[in-house]
Amino acid sequence: MDVSYNLRYQKQNLSNRVILDKEGEIIIYGKGFRLKGKGANDKGELINFSEIKEFYYRNDKIIFVTFAKEKYIISDSGTLFEQLLQDIYKARNEFLMDALFMKGGKLRAEFEGNFERQSKFGKLVNKGRARLRLYEKSLIVIPPTQDAFSVHFDFVNFHEFDEMDYCLKIVLDDSVTVVISQLGNDYDLFEEKMNTLLGGMYEMLVNECLKEIFPQFHAGTLLKLAYKMKGGKAVSLKEIEKIDKELEQAVTEFIMEDELFLEKVKLLTGMVEKKDVYYGIARDATVAGGFIKWVMVAIAEKNIVAFSILPRWQKSGDEARPMDRHEMYFFKIIMENGQAEDKVEDKIREIDQSLVVLNFAKDPCYKDKRELRHSPYQYAIRKMPFLRILRKSFIGKAGAQDAKEWQKQVKEIFGSAEI
């Protein structure tokens, strides 16, 4: 339901010169809000949350800057400031959860508790009280006057419940730490729900995906693979070989069953060791009984990490044909100093996060933002840190049908990646 507050608002240009100063009201909607001056003839300005680049508050003022570089200052809401702030954040956070793809599957439970988030360097990012929404594949933390953020279960490296302090500690793949505490009487139920969801994620990958593809392997072996391949994340051939040498061969045969692609990509795989070749498998929600198969190759020597989502097949009469070409996307390893080898892991994580969180959509990883202006990825390409870095590092793609022409395209890209 729409809510409104009386207040004053200013609009400033890039040079902080005031170009509008009005007494009026703010009307908060689901996707944004309208700032409207007094008088029936004043239509005001409608600002969608998707247009806002920066949003913060200071003392009794709310400040936001749009991507068009316009600055707005909302003030003079009096004793209703805190309620106004909470209502704006409530609507904004609902927008963020959809626009930044935080919701993983269906909502399973909701709690209230404290949170504390630290960077990989141990520096406090933020903390406070929040609503905690548990989805099938994610935990979303929704503070009343801060931006919501999500913990995607596919990228949980470690989690532990501390029965002494009644808290949950989560360490993510990028070494960010999140601690959930002060759950009160709901602590035991929260622990039960979290363990059920995290455990169910592995069972689903094994039973609904890996067991169907590799029925000859023991469930325990497939569970080890599922732990590393959560959500379809890419796993290096070396890691799969450590689990089971025969499994490594079976995964390779499944991924590389297309002989034309095998012929093309040998230019890349022939340059590296098993630790630098990665395979990912996930259930394909768009094709009944289908699977997503993808390949990633890290070539530190060439300052490159590349990935390809293999063509999905469709039947035409009695023949089966690929739905798209063997397109491979190349990304430069960006460094301020050091060796490319030291930064490979970061680039692999960026690709993993982008593909898994965005359900293996390739367009947001490389297309110009003007081409994505009306897509569901418009806000994500502007605000997801890992996706923004990945996009900046894109240097080209190879997509020729002919193997020799495809490899020629790759060699040209190599030249673009030289430091």
Image (cartoon, rainbow, N blue to C red):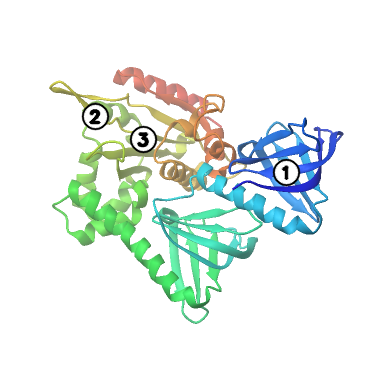
Would you say 355 lies left or right of 52 here? left
Q: Nearer the viewer, mark 2 or mark 3?
A: 2
Sequence-earlier tag: 3 or 1: 1
Does residue 156 lie above or below 334 as drawn? Answer: below
User: Looking at the image, can residue 137 be seen?
Assistant: yes
340 or 68: which is nearer to us?
68
In front: label 1 or label 2: 1
- Residue drawn at 55 percent across, 49 percent down: 94
Disc 3 packing (10 Å; few <14; some 14–19; many ≥20): few
Work out whether 220 lies above or below 339: below
Identity, as a three-letter code, of the amino acid under mark 1:
Ile
Tell me which label, 1 or 2, sits earlier in the chain: 1
Q: Quadrant of residue 120?
A: bottom right
Q: Amino acid at mark 3?
A: Met
Q: CA distance from mark 1 to mark 2?
A: 51 Å
Q: Which residue is mark 2?
A: 313
Residue at x 77% of width, y 30% of height? 41
Q: Nearer the viewer, mark 3 or mark 1?
A: 1
Q: Picture coordinates of residue 4 (x, y %)?
A: 70, 47
* Residue holding disc 1: 26
Q: Is residue 89 left or right of residue 222?
A: right
Instruction: Find numbered disc 1 in the image and state the secondary structure of the residue it sits on.
Output: strand
State left or right for residue 125 relative to residue 189. right
Residue found at the very far front of the displayed protein:
40
Residue indicated by mark 3 = 271
Q: Position of residue 190 (x, y in %)?
A: 44, 70
Q: Earlier in the sequence, mark 2 or mark 3?
A: 3
Q: Secondary structure at mark 3?
A: loop
Crowding at dot 2, Cα within 10 Å, few <14 / some 14-19 / many 20+, comes out as: few
Along the viewing direction, whichever of 309 and 409 lies nearer the viewer: 309
